[in-house]
Structures are given as structure tokens and as C-alpha cells.
Amino acid sequence: MGLWNRLLYRMRYPGVRIYNPAMTEIQRSARIGAGTRIGSFTLIHAGAVIGENCTIGSHCNICAGVVIGDNTSIQTGCHITRGVQIGMHSFVGPGVVTMNDKYMDGNLTPPTIGNRSRIGGRSAILPGIRIGDAALVGSGSVVTSDVADGMQVFGAPAKPRRAPGVPA
């Protein structure tokens, strides 16, 4: 199985580095750009689109309809739910979870994450939330409302914070 996966993935995804093909599943219609690296025990669902030069850590679940921009890093243990869009040059820390079904009724409203944004580890991003370009979400935050471009938010629920030494 390992040799077969290695050969299959090399043909299907030229220029993509899959660290452990025997322990990684990439479903048939997923698209992955050259220069991307994918860790072990990761599942990339059919219909996901991952840009060039990305990093997808181990133990990640990238669902159908997800679009990840070029040069973006998704760290270990993330769940990126169906329909999420993540911009270019962004960073998603380890253990981040996105959600897309506010009332668990099948009416999906996935969140979006802008370009050059940073999401701290173990954060949760609720359905329909928009995180703007160059925004920062502190580790362990629960994002319950939109985050404007360039804004920094921290906490549960996430609230804007002023950086130390910056006048009000």
C-alpha cells in the first residue's frame, strides 16, 4: 500500500512532498500546488484546493470545498471544515478548529480568513466569521464575531486588544 500510494501521489501531485504516503489520504479531486508539503496522518478531502508552497501539518483534516492560498501554513492537528477559504501568506497554528454549521441544521456558513493573517494555536473560529487581512487571533481564542483587517483579538470570546506600549 505504501509504495502504491507513493507512486500514485507522485503522478497526481508532481512537486508536492508527502512525508508519509502510506499514512496520508488525499482524495481524488483534491488539487495541490507545487512546493507544498503534507505531514503524516492527514486527510485532504475531494474538492479541496491547496495553493503552491503551503505547509499542511500532520494529523490535519482539510474538508471538501476548502481553498487555501499560496504560501500558507496549516500546523499540526487542525480541522478546516467544508467551504473555508484561507488567503495567501497566512498562518494557522496547531489545533485550530473552524466550524461551519451554526445551528447544526445543515445550513453551512463557513468562516473566511484573509491574506497575511495569523491564527494562534487551539483557537476556534465559529461559523460565518470573517477574519480580515493581516489580522491576528491570539492562541486559545474563541472567535465569535468578525475581525477587521489588521485587528488583534484575544480571549474567549475574542476581544480586540491594544498592544503593550501603544497609546489608546
Image (cartoon, rainbow, N blue to C red):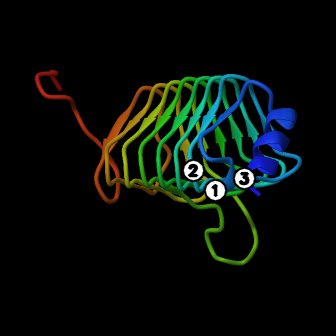
Amino acid at dot 1: Met
The picture quadrant where one finds residue 107 is bottom right
User: Image quadrant for the N terminus?
Assistant: bottom right
Crowd band around label 1 with a 10 angstrom C-alpha radius: few (<14), some (14–19), many (20+): some
Q: Nearer the viewer, residue 94 or 37?
A: 37
Image height of 21 relative to 32, above or below: below
User: Image quadrant for the C terminus?
Assistant: top left
> Which element is circle 2 on?
loop
Name the spot of residue 114 as percent of width and height, x first: 57, 32
| Residue drawn at x 82%, y 50% as measured from the top left | 4
The picture quadrant where one finds residue 15 is top right
Among numbered discs 2 and 3, the one appearing first in the sequence: 3
Q: CA distance from mark 1 to mark 3?
A: 8 Å
> Which element is circle 1 on?
helix
Q: CA distance from mark 1 to mark 2?
A: 6 Å
Q: Are marks 1 and 2 in contact (CB under 8 Å)?
A: yes
Q: Which residue is mark 3?
A: 2
Front tag of 2 and 3:
3
Q: Which residue is mark 2?
A: 40
